[in-house]
């Protein structure tokens, strides 16, 4: 299999949400054919540039998944399956990307705030950011403001993503931002918020830098923040 065919196959299987050969895809008859794990390993064995795999097979395929999600062709479980493929591929690629000297786009802490246990949206964002070249630290769910601040300090983070799915817990985002201010960290960290009850108005009200309705908007927001530097 030549390079372009292999890269296309990886992308196709990301879109199909097939991590391994035994997985079914959206299209019938794919079970038993190599999935993302097998194909990425094959690409690495062929010494294909890991950055090429990242951009052409992972980033571009997730843009297609994003379009399918926007057009209601894909539901959240479908997007999760594709995001899981990217997560597995990134675990395989990361050591090779580091060795190849591919620089991280920045350290990003992500957490669901105190009192909230929802993590599907957060997990998708974390995987997508890893795939886009960010160094992501997932602090988990139900994370107190103090622990979030500690994670920002310990990792000298450039970005902080806060998630909430309950109106009762989204107020805790403001508490995190106030603590960043009192610790003298606010100017060094861009804060992005997301989750069903949040909005652009709420982000402005609590002093966040951006509101993102999903992982794809988060990537767009970060891209514009990077180009504005």
Image (cartoon, rainbow, N blue to C red):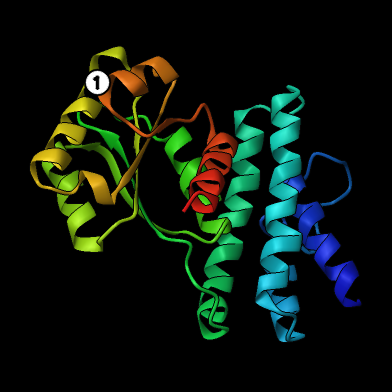
Q: Give above or below for 220 relative to 74.
A: below
Left or right: 3 as drawn, with respect to 74: right
Q: Which of 175/189 is in front?
A: 189
Figure check: 188 above or below 35: above
Q: Residues within 10 Å of mark 1 (few under 14, many from 20)?
A: some
The correct choice, above or below, for 143 with respect to 56 in the image is: above
| Residue at x 75% of width, y 46% of height | 15
Q: Which residue is mark 1?
A: 169
Q: Count of labels shown?
A: 1
Residue 219 relative to residue 189: left or right = right
On screen, residue 179 versus residue 205, left or right, reads left
Question: Percent x, y for residue 221?
Answer: 52, 39
Q: Quadrant of the N terminus?
A: bottom right
Where residue 182 sits in the image (x, y, percent)?
8, 40
Q: Foreground residue, 30 or 185? A: 185
Q: Residue at x 17, y 42 (%)?
A: 180
Q: Is residue 169 visible?
A: yes
Q: From the viewer's perspective, tell me whether residue 7 is left or right of residue 18.
A: right
In front: 132, or 76?
A: 132
Residue that appears at 21% across and 54% down = 151
Outermost residue toward the front in this view: 228
Residue 129 drawn at (x, y percent): 51, 51
For mark 1, give the secondary structure. helix
Q: Is residue 115 visible?
A: no
Instruction: Give me the residue at 42% from left, 25% from top.
Output: 195
Residue 63, horizontal then vertical, whole percent: 71, 44
């Amino acid at each position: 299999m030549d390079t372009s065919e292999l890269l296309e196959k990886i992308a196709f299987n990301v879109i199909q949400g097939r991590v391994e050969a035994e997985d079914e895809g959206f299209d019938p008859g794919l079970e038993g054919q190599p999935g993302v794990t097998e194909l990425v390993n094959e690409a690495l064995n062929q010494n294909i540039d890991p950055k090429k795999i990242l951009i052409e097979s992972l980033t571009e395929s997730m843009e297609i998944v994003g379009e399918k999600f926007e057009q209601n062709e894909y539901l959240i479980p479908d997007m999760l399956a594709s995001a899981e493929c990217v997560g597995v591929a990134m675990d395989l690629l990361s050591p090779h990307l580091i060795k190849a000297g591919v620089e991280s786009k920045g350290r990003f802490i992500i957490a669901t705030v105190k009192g909230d246990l929802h993590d599907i949206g957060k997990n998708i964002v974390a995987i997508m950011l890893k795939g886009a070249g960010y160094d992501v630290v997932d602090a988990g769910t139900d994370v107190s403001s103090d622990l979030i601040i500690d994670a920002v300090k310990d990792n000298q983070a450039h970005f902080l993503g806060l998630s909430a799915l309950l109106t009762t817990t989204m107020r805790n985002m403001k508490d995190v931002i106030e603590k960043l201010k009192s610790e003298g960290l606010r100017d060094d960290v861009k804060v992005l918020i997301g989750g069903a009850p949040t909005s652009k108005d709420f982000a402005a009200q609590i002093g966040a830098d951006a509101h993102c309705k999903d992982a794809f908007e988060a990537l767009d927001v970060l891209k514009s923040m990077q180009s504005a530097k």
